Image (tube, coloured by chain):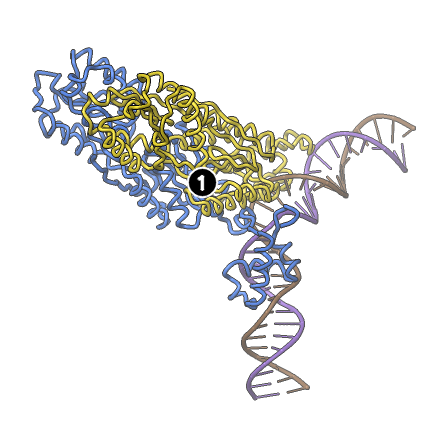
Chain colours: A yellow, B blue, C purple, D brown
Amino acid sequence: MKSGQKSTIYDIARKAGASPSAVSAALSDKWKQRRLKQETVERIRQIARDEGYSANLQARGLRKAESGLAGMVLPDHENRFFAELSQQFAREAHARGLCPAIVHAGREADAQLRSVESLIAYSVDLLMIAGATEPLELAYACRKARVRHVFVDHPCIEAPSVVTDNTAGATKLTQTLLNDMEAPSASDPTTWLYFLGGEQHLPASAERILGFRQETKASQALFDPEQILACGYESEKAEKALAALHARLGQLPAGLFVNSIGCLEGVLRFLSRLPEGEISKSTFGCFDYDPFATLSRFPLRMVRQRADLMVGEAFRQLDAGAFEPNLIRVPTQLI
Amino acid sequence: MKSGQKSTIYDIARKAGASPSAVSAALSDKWKQRRLKQETVERIRQIARDEGYSANLQARGLRKAESGLAGMVLPDHENRFFAELSQQFAREAHARGLCPAIVHAGREADAQLRSVESLIAYSVDLLMIAGATEPLELAYACRKARVRHVFVDHPCIEAPSVVTDNTAGATKLTQTLLNDMEAPSASDPTTWLYFLGGEQHLPASAERILGFRQETKASQALFDPEQILACGYESEKAEKALAALHARLGQLPAGLFVNSIGCLEGVLRFLSRLPEGEISKSTFGCFDYDPFATLSRFPLRMVRQRADLMVGEAFRQLDAGAFEPNLIRVPTQLI
DNA sequence: ATCGGTTGCTCAATCGATGTAGCAAAGGTA
DNA sequence: TACCTTTGCTACATCGATTGAGCAACCGAT
């Protein structure tokens, strides 16, 4: 209290005329099984309160071979979805009496691995990895250290994983968009529904494209491979790709399925340069959600990934302590 | 490597036929001053690599009375500004060889205090506190534990703090909005510029209101206390407050200064129910930035808080190790 | 008076890494 | 040969909390 130095159980023991072990027991809930007198316990606790004592968690962690830390690795936070994930993660961690330690590791596999190893070195009690670029090596690192772990968003074939049900979500969105459109005609590309954004080889995009393709095929609205414009995730690329499509068609297509919020930004930027009349003829949807996007100047269907449900499922996996692969798909919400 | 258990310097020492101290020295950069043969060092390092050794950071932290952790406490992540802050924090922490541990503590003073105490108990090497509800007690906790700390966004009068230059930003935005409007007339409340959102007693809002008031006064555009509608930060409240104003005036006011992104959401929701013609007669500005909001259907001035600069300044304070109060104001960017 | 059982505590080892102090051997000088 | 210096390492205490083992005092029963 006075000196400003942090006090230890030894200080308190001295002041209470007791032994450090008694202090340790008194401050935990083990004092009963350690047969301390209630009176002694209360005396010790009073002194601890007066001293403003708080345990050195590194010492405790070292001794108990755990840390009370819940580790989370994720690429970045500028993405609304990841932000929501980390928010939920913190909530669930707190609910388990753990202190959330959230690390932004970027998109590079190497940096992610270093972050995971770092968290393992702190003896985190569990580890949640979102958006892993190279999940396998991360899983091996966790395995080796016997750290419970779960992958979110990007799955790992060797570990428990929770992902958005991309295919089902894309199917639903595609169906909804087609419903809102006039029936497309094979001979007129301006009447088609286009898929814009993402990268074919990434699992999430691949699944969404699968859903899009299945549904367009089922609705007899798939005519051409060019309906799928997997131009990447950046807004600039999406803007360019849409501009090119607009130039080629001489107008906007009847429907547009935008893959990811970043792409939507580019799309909106392009659309903001078009006259109102032209936009209102088309139907738009986006796989991702942003509250401000709902307030854009034309109707926009959005697929919201349920970060809350995903983190809930992820913790169910962690609580079960399973290390076996187990892929859980969480449904999306159409807005 | 084989057993799956994490190896320690003792395991490596045994395999290398050396002592634990030699291993410790060999794996750090102290082997030269500890006079180990280069050959021995290389042998030890090779074995460490083979074993996949990584130091137990809790043990190291306990011994060295530091942790290698950079702690950050912030209310939540759903806010774009806080998300950017934490992102930058992670960057700077990494640059200093620290592992960022970011904790969402919510808005309640009590939860924030517990989070701070928890991070202190892990012996974090520095602590950045964003959006503190009750900064003073947090500062005392840090002081007591001799932990370097800095407040961001919400300042603390007893500690180094970095905040947005709210007054200057509000002045600039007010000026810009007034410039874009017709000259207001004292007798006609529909021609006035209104300030919507925030809470008078919170420092950030108070400063912005000050800037708004100074500038409207200077421009002879301040007529009535009712021009300031500090209805809180939630979108619902802002929506209601604007609806009430609209009902009272019989139309939208000529200008609206929206305080914070949350309020903007409510404002946009209300405006989305109005006809296009009515909206285009008014001038809008918002103290906060969101890329999607730039794409709304009418021009909107936004003040962007520079999270990058703020975190940079905050780390400058931390690096200097100062404990004395020191309020730094970071300029905003008008968009 | 002795024994067994309970109560209320203390002792000392432990977790893993660090770092000071110091030992033994080799080399150099007187 | 005795003495000092340098080289290359090891021994051991330390950080603070936890926990198994164990000790002393006391009670009641034989």
Q: State the image coordinates of residue B20 (x, y, percent, origin top left).
A: 61, 58
Q: Which residue is mark 1?
A: A103
**Residue at 17% of width from left, 20% of height from top?**
B227
Q: Position of residue A254 (x, y in %)?
A: 29, 22
- x, y percentage for residue B221? 11, 24
Q: Quadrant of residue B41?
A: bottom right
Q: Secondary structure at mark 1?
A: strand
In the image shown, does A50 or B149 lie closer to the viewer?
Answer: B149
Say what amino acid the circle numbered 1 marks.
Val
Residue shown at the point (32%, 20%) measured from the top left: A184
Label 1 marks a residue whose chain is A
Residue A312 position (above or below residue C29): above
Vertical side of B61 occupied by A286: above or below = above
Which residue lies at the image location 9% right of the left edge and 22% below the top edge?
B184
Left or right of A264 on screen, residue A21: right
Judged left or right of residue A16, residue B305 is left
